[in-house]
Amino acid sequence: MRIVIQRVQHASVTVEGCITGQIGLGLLVLAGFAPDDTPAVLDWMARKLVQLRIFSDDEGKMNRSVQDTGGQVLVVSQFTLLADARKGNRPSYIGAAPPPIAIPLYEQFVLRLEQLLRHPVATGEFGADMKVALLNDGPVTIVLDYPEK
């Protein structure tokens, strides 16, 4: 599993002209899933995400998490995060979980975030052609991979 975390002032996802998810101050999370991801992987990533101290405290230091600030989270599935572009010019996506595996992982990840945050998490639409708009804050962008086994 790999996620890209962006601290945002606001973000939204649109599918076929309709907004499927939007947030104010918080985190836009692009999430890619691998075929061997497990509930333990999802839990570790969700906990790390909600506890990651990337929001400023009263002294301007990044000392607060999205959980601390009550910020919102928007999760967008993105299989291209698992692309391998080391050879040739066309990325290979064989490292990404196929939809029958990835959809339940995505849904479980969102559910786990909602449990930890104790409020709803906005989402895109799995497998759709999505348009993502955001105002990156900072900018703060972090790539998080699950630790090697």
Image (cartoon, grey):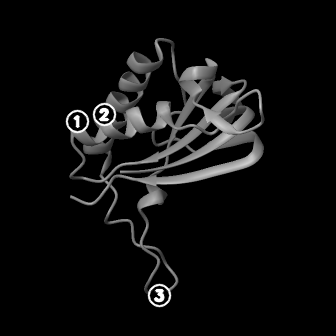
Please name the residue that numbered disc 2 is placed on: 43
Q: Can residue 16 be seen here?
A: no
Residues under numbered marks 3 and 2 in contact, where contact means CB atoms less than 8 Å apart? no
Q: Residue furthest top?
A: 118
Question: Within 10 angstroms of label 3, few (less than 14), some, or many (20 or more) residues?
Answer: few
Q: Amino acid at mark 1?
A: Pro
Q: Secondary structure at mark 3?
A: loop
Residues under numbered marks 3 and 1 in contact, where contact means CB atoms less than 8 Å apart? no
Residue 56 x/y as whole percent = 71, 34
- Whichever of labels 3 and 1 marks the residue nearer the N terminus, that label is 1
Residue 50 relative to residue 133: left or right = left
Question: Within 10 angstroms of label 2, few (less than 14), some, or many (20 or more) residues?
Answer: some
Q: Measure the alpha-carbon separation of dots 3 and 2.
A: 35 Å
Please name the residue that numbered disc 3 is placed on: 88
* Residue at figure coordinates x 22%, y 38% from the top left: 40
Q: Measure the alpha-carbon separation of dots 1 and 2.
A: 6 Å
